[in-house]
Amino acid sequence: MRLNRPTQLSPPFQEVLWAIAYEAFPAIVREGHNTTNIARLSQSVAALSRSLTRDRAQLPSDYLKRTQERLAYYLYFLPSNFLKIQHLIVDMAASWSEFPPKLEVLDLGCGPGTMGLGVIDFFAHQAEKPDQMHLKIVFVDHVKENVSLAKRTAHVYWQRLQADHLIPQDWKLTVEGHHLAVGDKRLAQIGSSFDWVIAANVLNELFLFQEEDFPSQARLWQRLGDRLLAPDGYFCFIEPALRETSQNLLRLRDYLISANWYVFAPCLSPSSPCPALQTGKGDWCHEERAWSAPPWIEAVDAQVGLIKDAIKFSYSILSKSPRNLSSYLSSPHPYRMVSDLMKSKGQSKAFLCDGCARSLYERQDKHANQGNHAFAIAHRGDVLDISGESKHRVAEDTSVQICF
Ligand SMILES: C[S@@+](CC[C@H](N)C(=O)[O-])C[C@H]1O[C@@H](n2cnc3c(N)ncnc32)[C@H](O)[C@@H]1O
């Protein structure tokens, strides 16, 4: 199945975001006042960005209740986060022979609906679509204003996609919203057969992952998976691409594997402990994908001094059924590139991981040829098929292909 990997926000989505911003934040955002809107948005983004970094310790967990912060999140943080889930969907879709006719998705800690909207957008922008599909998106957050904003945006975006004939008329969307906290027992009543449960940028907000608290926090996620996921469903975690948050995600991944879950992606082995955590050197793993930022994000960046020039994140897709991305690839020896490609005088180097071990591979320029050219053009996150290498050296007789 050929799938489109997204690199930008479509014009209809950009228009819907601003239309809802005018509607939901009338005291701050005004139609036809672009310069003022960008100046006000920049102020809000600067304040939220400070709160999320320097003043993190003082940030209340319901900070998105505050109108300015919610607006900043909606127009500045949502757009890049929204594309992240679409990269995970491409991974999960490796196991499909066709689009699923029905998909139930839980967006847990949904904020303004970022991940659920990303799921809708992914299907709308595929070239080959089935005639029928039923998407059920359930938004959950402990800030009720987030849940309302998520539901409203999903409805308006769906109507717009149908009006623009970007989704077939027979496709159906069901949207639900629940104002609940993650640990709330009532979560068990919202469904028990979700195909995807997505918790994006939530782990680091819920828990500080103090050593002594880790086991109880990890058990909570295990229980959530047991209660909410369909037997072959996927639990998708996305976290910021920072050392501490990524390592906490990897620790949770290892815990869930020890509790008989399996990792589907990005790792290429279903049940091996993460090799980055084994080195004892504070290693971690993250993704970096290209995107074209919409114009207002570039304008805000210029005013605030931030840079959103790439999409950076860490992720883990876990399942209770024993499946791994590697078994859907045509490669007998897949390795994921887990660093940038480092070019220096006379050679190229990169860290590659086969799911069990992570090692530095190198190719001398004098050994460059058509058969191993892929090594020198690959990017972080690409999966390479490598055969004929010895001692982590890509030589003249080594074959390298980008297979995913
Ligand atoms: C950084 S935002 C992420 C929003 C969205 N998932 C995204 O990736 O763009 C974290 C969200 O988690 C929500 N949240 C934090 N603690 C929560 C809890 N205990 N229960 C439910 N939601 C929570 C916050 O209200 C906020 O909307």
Image (cartoon, rainbow, N blue to C red):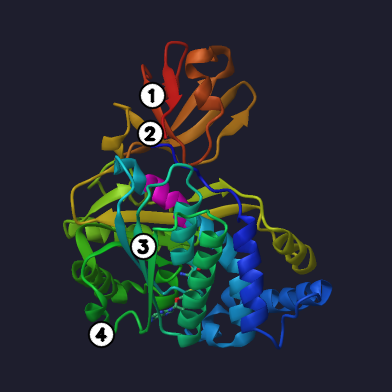
- Which residue is nearer to you in this view: 38 or 222? 38
Pointer 1 with pointer 2, Cβ within 8 A: yes
Left-right relation of 366 to 274: right
Residue position for label 1: 386
- Residue, disc 4: 186
SS label for mark 4? helix
**Labelled disc at residue 335:** 2
* Residue nearest the observer in this picture, 308 or 397: 308
* Residue 210 coordinates in the image, percent (x, y): 36, 74
Dot 1: few (<14), some (14–19), or many (≥20) neighbours within 10 Å? Answer: many
Q: In the rendered structure, which amino acid carries the disc numbered 4?
A: Arg
Query: Which stretch did the figure color magenta?
Result: 85-91
Q: Position of residue 77 (x, y in %)?
A: 59, 67
Is the residue marked 2 within 8 Å of ligand 1, measured from its CB? no
Of badges 4 and 3, the one in the foreground is 3
The span from disc 1 to disc 3 (Cα, nearest Å) is 38 Å
SS type, badge 2: strand
CB under 8 Å between discs 3 and 2: no
Q: Amino acid at mark 3?
A: Leu
Secondary structure beneath label 3: strand
